[in-house]
Image: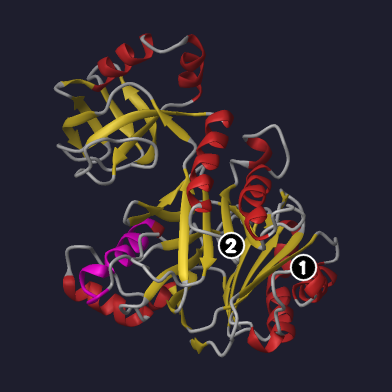
Amino acid sequence: MEHTSSATDLVVRSALSANIDAMLAAEQVCEQVLDPSSHPGQGELRGSEIDLALVCVGGDHATQASRIYEFVTEHLNPGLTLGVTAQGVIGDDVELENAPGVSVLCASLPGTHLQGFTYRQLPHATPGDRESLESLATEIGAEADSRGVLFFGDPFSVPAGPMTEGISSLPRVVPGLKRLPVMGGMASAGKVPGQNIITLNDHAMRTGGAGVMIRGNLTVDSLVSQGCRPIGQAMVVTEAKRNVVQKLGGRPAIEVIREMVDALPQEDRGLVSGGLFIGRVVNEYKDRFGRGDFLIRAVLGVDQGSGAIAVGDSLRVGQTVQFHLRDATTAREDLELLLEAQQLLGPAAGGLLCTCSGRGRRMFDEENHDAALISRALGRQADPVGQTPMPMGGFFAAGEIGPIGDRSFVHGHTASLTLFRPLRESFDQAG
C-alpha cells in the first residue's frame, strides 16, 4: 500500500470525541478534523489532501473499532489509515483514561511518499545479517530519504523488540540513510489475545500489527521520556549471562546496591522499595552520561545467595550501567526537560503521543498530565497567547516505541512523542 502526497501545505489536525455512542463519536471526529475553527490559525485541512489518518479507539468503543475505522476512512478518504485500539485515547491536551472515546490525527504532508506494511509481510531480520536487513528494507520501502516509521502492534502476537531492532539497523544497508527512528506503541484494549484490532486502510487484524514508512520532504522528530533519574555511580558489567548480572565493577551486584542505597537520602530509599531500575548506556563512546543516555529497564529480582540480580534486558560484560529511580516528580521533570529541547527546534505542526497505560492518574495526581504538559510547552510556540493547543492524537499503550540515541526500542512507563515539522535545511536525521 503506497501513497504519494499531492498536498501543498503541511497541516496537521486532531479531533477527540467522548460520545458514548461509538458511531456518533466517529461522526463527530470527522466533522471536527475538517472544521477550520477547531484549530484557528493553523491552516485548513481539505479532505482531498489528507495523506495520513491515525485513528485511536478507546474503552468500550474498541468492540466497534472495525466500523469506526471504516467510517473514518470513507468520510475523510486519507491516503493511508493506521488504526489501533486502546484502554484510553488522547486528543490535544485531553486524556480519556479507561473510557470510551475516538481520537483522530490527520495530516497533509506535502512532498512525502508513504508506504504501508503489515507485520506479517516483514521478513525476520537481525542486525548482523546483511541479507535479511536488505530484504526488510525492500519490504518496507526504506530509502535514503526515509524520515521514520510509525507502527501499531498487538502485544500478544508481535515480538516488538526484535522487529524494532531490525528496522533501526537498516541504515547499515541503505546507502545515504543515516538514521531510521521507529515510533508508535502497542494496543492496550485487549486483556487476552484476539481482543485488539489494528488496521491498515481496510485491512483489520486481531493479531500482528501495521506500520507506515514516511519518506520525503518532512522532518519527523521524537522524544521518549523514561521518567527516571540516575542514582549512585555508573559502573561496568564484569560478569553477566543474558539478563542476570552477577558482578558490577568486579563486586557482587547485590553488594553494590546495598552500598548505594545506604548512601541515599531517606526519601530516595523509600522509592527504592517501590521499584529499582537499571539503565544501560546506549552510546558507549560518550565521555559523560546523564538523563537520556540510558535505556531503562526494571530490576526484576535478586539472589541473596549468589549476589546476582535479574533485570528486564540482556546485558553483556563491558557494558556501562547505572541504577535509576522513578516517581511522579521525576517523570514530570524529565518530560519538561525534553520538551525544552524540542522548543529549540521550532513549532511543530502536530504530533502523536503514545503514553504508557501505567502513567496517567496511576502515576500523577492530576488529569491529562502528559497531554496537557506537551500542549502547554509546544502549543504556545504556534499560538503565543496559548489558547490553541498543538494538534495531537494518541493513546495509552501496552508498550511504547521510540528512539534513545540512534536506535529505537520498546519501552514501559514512558511517554513517546512523535512530532511533524517542515524539512529543516540542515536535516541530518538526528531526531
Estimate the spatial distance between the alpha carbons at disc 2 and disc 1, rounded to whole Å. 17 Å
- Helix, strand or loop under label 2: strand
- Tell me if I can see residue 163 in this picture: yes
Of the pair 91 and 145, the residue shown nearer to us: 145
Quadrant of the snapshot with the C terminus: bottom left
Of the pair 131 and 110, the residue shown nearer to us: 110
User: In the figure, is residue 17 to the left or right of 151?
Assistant: right
Report the magenta residues as a range: 161-176
Give x and y (percent) for residue 206.
56, 69
Give x and y (percent) for residue 172.
21, 68
Residue 15's place in the image compared with 31, above or below, is above
Question: Counting residues from the N terminus, which is met first, the one under dot 2 or under dot 1?
Answer: 1
Residue in the picture at 57% in, 36% down: 332
Give x and y (percent) for residue 66.
68, 75
Residue 58's place in the image compared with 291, above or below, is below
Quadrant hosting residue 64: bottom right
| Magenta span contains residue 172 | yes
Residue 235's place in the image compared with 419, above or below, is above
> Which label belongs to residue 99?
none
**Amino acid bearing label 1:** Pro
Q: Which residue is mark 2?
A: 351
Give the main secondary structure, helix, strand or loop, of the magenta stretch: helix
Label 2 crowd (10 A; few <14 / some 14-19 / many >=20): many
Residue 424's place in the image compared with 241, above or below, is below
Quadrant hosting residue 194: bottom right
> Which label belongs to residue 40?
1
